[in-house]
Image (cartoon, grey):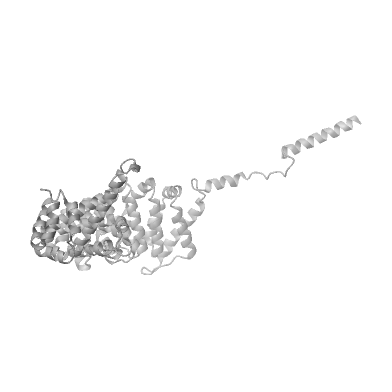
Amino acid sequence: MDHSVDGAEEVEDERDSCQGEQSPVMDRNPSPPPDTDEGQEEAVDTIGETVYSKHWLFSTLTRLIQLATEQEKGAADAQMELTDNDEEDLCIVWDMATDKDVAGFLQEFKAADILLGVIAKSRCPRLTEICVGILGNIACFPDTCVSLSQNEDLGAVLLLLFGDTDPPTLLETSRLLLTCVSQKDVCPLWLQRIRQQKSVCPSLCFIMSSSTNIDLLVKVGELMDKLFDLDEELMRSWITAQQTEEEEACERYPDLASSLLEAAKQLRSESSDGLEVYLHIFQLLTTIVEGIQTLAVPEGPGRDVWDFLCNVVCEDLCQPDKPSLVLQEQKVLLFQALAVLSALYRCQDQLHNLTEKCFPLVGSIFQVLHYCKCQEDKTEDCNDSEDAGKEEPGDVHLVALVETTSEFLADIFVHITKDTVAEMVKKGFLTEKTCLSAVSSLLPQYKCALQHLESLLSETDPQLADVVRKGIPV
């Protein structure tokens, strides 16, 4: 009996041992066996640290190649459309490319070559736009931008895309090029390509002179602003570019300055930021001799630029009822506009009669100087107060605006005639208040200009002449 008991216990011990090996914890249901193969496959299928699937991405790229092949087989002049599903999948890839790991993965597996082949074969504007957009996102990261930029065929095709007629494609092409030239490691390579590809300048001029797409005009302006800021020689060559006889026989494209002006007119009421970009380009043009010569040539665009900027300053930025807050917000735009006007004013021998027609502009200049004086007084009061602590740094934009406006007004006073002064007094542009503002702003650097104004006022309005005279130190 003891033996049987011992045997039962032995059997029970063996049963417990087997159960223990199967499930060490007996107070819950046993865990399912680990799915090791699926877990490893899932880890292998994800891209970097993301949850994006390599398999799905490969499938989508394969479908992209099929789409390009189908389009190539179609009629040469027939446009094709993407299905909703294809467009949705490609837009997901477009969004995915904003991730650094995905961008690197795409570049590693030669996605740029695939996208280039699709762009070359595409007869669907939306497909081309998406492909260029994906490339634009890939280029946002320095390493992938370098790899992408070294593709010579891709570089050539992208520059030729500026001759496309589809605004969204042009927008994405401009964004991609702006991204590339903003990367210091590849910027010289792209500048060299742009210099060599002669079609870029006329294509951009055509876009600026004919497009009404605000986003496109802003992005093209940002690209051109960046190019001119980086490469003065490129700016010089584009401003002086002449069409060949073959080009003139085919189609006359507008000159650079006129194209910039047309784009600025489009943006005037739609985008102050965009207008600011174009005024900065005009400002860059006035820093080189060739730019001034182009603007000042008889029958050239200089007079139209002058009239446009006068309207911007007088009607948009410096209306009499404009509060100081508006001027504060627009001081960069004001500075750029007045800087270009000042440069053009020095060309009045070629442009003719600028002084006689600038009465509202002079009134606006006085308003700007008065505003700047008020701002300077506020800054001084703040720095002198007990709570100021340490002196606040000066507003560089305000300083630049004061310097440019003062220099411009001094030039006007030097070239002004007695009849013009009399007319300005009559129209209320020269008053005791504005004369005091002029004296305060122009001394001591522009003393000669004030003395010339005082001599003319002594013949037209002796009382105002005394105001100016008392302000000029002996």
Quarter of the rendering occupied by the N terminus: top right
Residue 301 appears at what percent x and percent y? 18, 64
Q: Nearer the viewer, residue 345 or 274?
A: 345
Q: Residue furthest top?
A: 2
Q: Nearer the viewer, residue 31 or 328?
A: 328
Instruction: Determine the residue positioned at 31% across, 61% down.
Output: 217
Residue 128 appears at what percent x and percent y? 39, 61
**Do we see residue 344 in this rendering?**
yes
Instruction: Determine the residue positioned at 22% across, 63% down.
Output: 310
Residue 291 appears at what percent x and percent y? 18, 56
Please state the total of marks drawn on the protein image: 0
- Image position of 1 with respect to 102: above or below: above
Residue 208 appears at what percent x and percent y? 28, 63
**Do we see residue 449 in this rendering?**
no
Q: Residue furthest right?
A: 1
Snapshot quadrant of residue 211: bottom left
- Image position of 195 with respect to 73: above or below: above
Query: Viewed as shown, does residue 419 lie left or right of 168?
Result: left
Q: Nearer the viewer, residue 279 or 137?
A: 279
